[in-house]
Amino acid sequence: MCESAIRRYYIDEGLTEKEAEVRQLSAKDAFDAMMEGAALMLDFIGKVEYTYVTKSGNKVHGILDSPA
């Protein structure tokens, strides 16, 4: 995850540099927590393969696995 890109996104949305930095740190913490939860889930159920379709109709195909 590119932290400067996240910060730049928030600045482009009109936040100050300090506000953007706080949001960036919060986003990183949230992403880390989500990945920890995903790894724990995958330890129990194994590999997950999925296709996500965005509102615009684009497709994202993903495979999640937690190697031992």
Image (cartoon, rainbow, N blue to C red):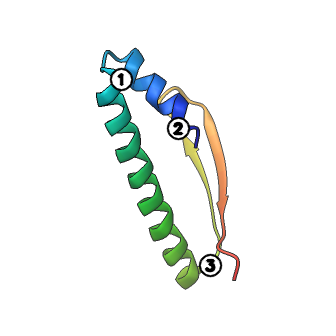
Disc 2: which residue:
3
Per the image, label 2 sits on a secondary structure element best described as helix
Numbered label attached to residue 46:
3
Q: Residue at x 47, y 58 (%)?
A: 32
Q: Position of residue 12 (x, y in %)?
A: 41, 15
Per the image, label 3 sits on a secondary structure element best described as loop
Question: Which of 29/57 is in front?
Answer: 29
Q: Residue at x 31, y 28 (%)?
A: 18
Can you say whether 38 is above or below 56 in the image? below
Can you say whether 11 is above or below 29 in the image? above
Check if mark 2's residue and mark 3's residue have beta carbons within 8 Å: no
Label 3 to label 1, Cα distance in Å? Answer: 41 Å
Type of the residue with mark 2: Glu
Would residue 39 appear left or right of 28 to someone viewing this image?
A: right
Per the image, label 1 sits on a secondary structure element best described as helix
Numbered label attached to residue 17:
1
